[in-house]
Every structure is written in C-alpha cells, then in structure tokens.
Amino acid sequence: MAAQFDSFVIFAEMRTGSNLLESCLNHLNDLQCHGEVFNPRRLADPKTGPLLALTQTEIGNRPQRLLKRMKKAPGLHGFRYFHDHDPRILDEILNDSKCAKIILTRNPVESYISLKIAYNTDRWQLSHIRDSRPFQAPFKPAEFEAFLGPLRAFQALILNSLQRSGQTAFYLDYTDITDLTVLNGLAAFLGCADRIDALPTAQIVQNPHEMAEKVRNFPEMEAALAKIDWANLSRTPNFEPRRGPHVPGFIGSYAAGLLFMPIQAHPTAPIRDWLGTLARHDNDTPDTQSDFTRKTLREWMQTSKTHRSFTVLRHPLVRAHAAFCSVVALPQNDGLRQMLAQNYNVPNPADPSILASDLAAFHAGFLGFLGFLRANLNQQTGFPVLIEWASQTMQLKGFGEITLPHVLCREDRLAQDLTELAAAIGAKGAEAPTCLSGPPSPIALQDIYDGALEQAARRAYGTDYLTLGFDDWRPKGTVQ
C-alpha cells in the first residue's frame, strides 16, 4: 500500500449504491471498508459487535478513538459517512489530508424514489430477482424538497472544505459502480496494487426499471421537477466581507431587561435616551450600560435572564442616503469624491457646498454613489466596504457570533415597535422615539426621490430588500 493515505471515507447517502461500492472495495487485498460505523442508529444496535477491539459504546462515547485505530491497523481501513452521521468527527475527517475522500453521488430523484420503494417493500439489498417486490412510489413535491435540501448542503460543505484545504477527491456516480475500469481507477487512487477482476454477485441492482414504471404519479412528478431551481439560479450572490458583532456598541438596560444591538452607522442617541428612562419595577433605577466586551456581555445576559434583545432596521435607500451625506458630501472626503467622479460619474465640483443647493447635482451624485455601492459591496472597486454603507444583512449575520436580536424593529414604525417591545417585558418609561434621527442632511431624500434611485438601491442592496422584506421607500405624506 502506498503511504499517501492511511484511511479513507466514502461520502454518500442512502440509496446511492454505497453498499455495492463497499462490497467491491472489500474484494481488494489489504483494504477494508467497515460500513456506516458512525451512524448513530447503528451504534444503538445491540447486534453490532466490537470493531478493532472497540465496543459500540466506546465508539459512541469517543468516536475519535476508532479513527486512530483505523490509521494504525494493517492495510487501509475506511468507512461510509452520510450527512446525518456523527458530526463530532466530520471536521477531523475533512481536514485530514491523509484520509482519502471518495464522493459517491446519484441523481437525487432516483435516490428519493428508491428510498420510498425500500421503505414500503422492506427490501434494502437484493441478492436474487425472486426476492424483489414490485411497488410504485408516490412522488410528493414538498417531501422531495425536504429530502433534497440536506443533501445539497452537505455536498456544498464537502466541496468548500476540500477547496480551502487544497485536497482532491475521487468522484463516482451511481452508474460508475458497475464499471470495472472506474473501480480499478479508484483502487489506484487509494494506492492499492490489487485490482478487481469481477463484480461481486452477492448483490444485484434492485430497481433498474424506467422512472415512469417506478412512480405512481409520474406526470405530476415531471411538472413538480420542472419548478425546482436545480442550478440555484435564484440565489443572490453576496461577496461582501463578513463582519463581527461589534459588541462594544451594544447598549443594555438591566432595569428594563432590554439589550439594544445597533446596526453600525445608524444613530443610537434616541434609543439610548429612551432606554435610560425604562424600568420594570417601581423600585428599579433606570440605567444604561455600554462598552461591553464579550465577557461582560455574557455576564449581563446571565444576570438579566429574562432580557430581550433588539435592533432597528432602516430602509436601504435611507441608509444609503445617510452614507452619501455623511461620507461623500463632506469636504474632508476629497479622495473618495475624486475616485467617484472619475469612475462613477458623481459630480465633484470645486466647492462641495454646491451639492447642498443643487437638487439635480445632488440627485446625479447620489445615483452615481448607489452604482458605486453595488460594485463596492461585490468587491469590484478595490475600495474597502466602509461600515457607513455595509449591508444590514451582513451585520445581522455578524451578530450571530455571540447572540441574535430577538426582535427586529423598523424605523418607519419605530415608536410602535418599541412600545410593544417594552410592554411585552413589562418595562415603563418615556414615550418611544419615532425615528433614529441623526445629523441634518444637505438635501432631504424626499426632495429628490424617484424610481431611478429606488432601482439603483435595489441593485446595490438586493439581499437586504429580499431577506428583510423591504418594499419601495415612501416619502412622507404619501398614501400607504
């Protein structure tokens, strides 16, 4: 055996042909595949005996011990691993370049139908045609979608891990298992000098018929499959860099039992002031606490066990307008303004105050800035993504590193959302603020708003619009 690998894993799923592949590999000298040894349901089977001198209980308590035994045992040892097997060893397997990766896949529709047939006939393996039982499986669209989701996610996880670690894998399709030349190519990949000269006869293909014969409602299945986004074309690409939770910016009120997790660059003073008036009991002194570290934040949450955390979402167009006013339309940002003028048609007059008085110039500048934001958030500009215009979706993901906001308030109904939140936790104080406010703008968004700005904002912040459910921005005074 070559020393390139000291173990191997077959990444597969139910009804992909992994039993047959294992049977083929076990015909090679000095190679042993031990089946689904990390399947939690297998570990609970009292009929399963010890493996490499480890009992099933020992494997269940410390699965890493079995991995070590396989590496040290004579020959090359491996196993089959499915998406729902013991997750405690997955990272170790994926990161181990000495563990050969074999990836076995099958058309998921065929796997799904085969699985339904097996469940209904109780025939999981077949050694003779006389033991087969005919059955037409019903195709259920929602059930198939639920079946497909974890398989897709697991395959993406494996691929991404191999890419990051610079490893390669040997890929097999279900139909490749009966091809001796492919199987012997796999033997060469594993560093095995032995070769397979004939397919094993202990197992035969169970359901070789056409799909129309195996499915009870074949026309309905065809119609349902036509609606599935196989290429994931509906996914919105997102190349924006990840962000941490910015814990020092959190504001807590122990007396009120509320934790404010601000989206960065949004004004916080109105909510900080409001929190400073709240308390749940008459004898509580209203308070606010900030400048948290991760340690002190955990301590705060542990002390205030019934707390509620919240953040405030701002319409993407309003957020972009605030960024344009505070970052671009100020004289101290001449370098950024020059870059925008050269590449994104943003007017860059000698006197920046012109933008504060010329509606057409301000509109043109803001429209160009939105075009810049789209390119910048997709890592196409070479200019860093500043927090002033980073997407809210990415910041919400960053919160997840330490905690998640229990409530997502919206600025356009801020007073109502905050009042309901305070009432839910029994806190009383001053009236809730109606908006985040902030520094005055040279020109109000209401004075320049049109469909072109809205569409440009949607192109820049498509993920925020989609995932956070934003509609078009409505100027004050318009009919809802």
Image: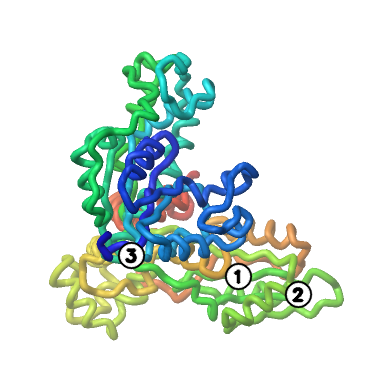
* Residue hosting label 3: 98
Of the image marks 3 and 1, the number of the one nearer the N terminus: 3
Report how far apart the C-alphas of labels 3 and 2 lie in the structure: 56 Å
| Residue 433 pos. (x, y %) | 61, 66
Are the residues at dot 3 and dot 1 in contact (C-beta closer than 8 Å)? no
Q: For the residue labelled by badge 2, is the local secondary structure a helix, a strand or a loop? A: loop
| Residue 236 pos. (x, y %) | 33, 50
* Residue at x 20% of width, y 47% of height: 185
Please name whichever residue, 320 or 443, is drawn nearer the observer in this view of the structure.
Answer: 320
**On the rendered structure, is 238 left or right of 424?**
left
* Residue at x 51% of width, y 57% of height: 52
Q: Is residue 383 above or below residue 405?
A: below
Residue type at mark 2 is Ala
Q: Residues within 10 Å of mark 3 (few under 14, many from 20)?
A: some
* Residue hosting label 2: 255
* Residue at x 38% of width, y 22% of height: 207
Q: Residue furthest right?
A: 283
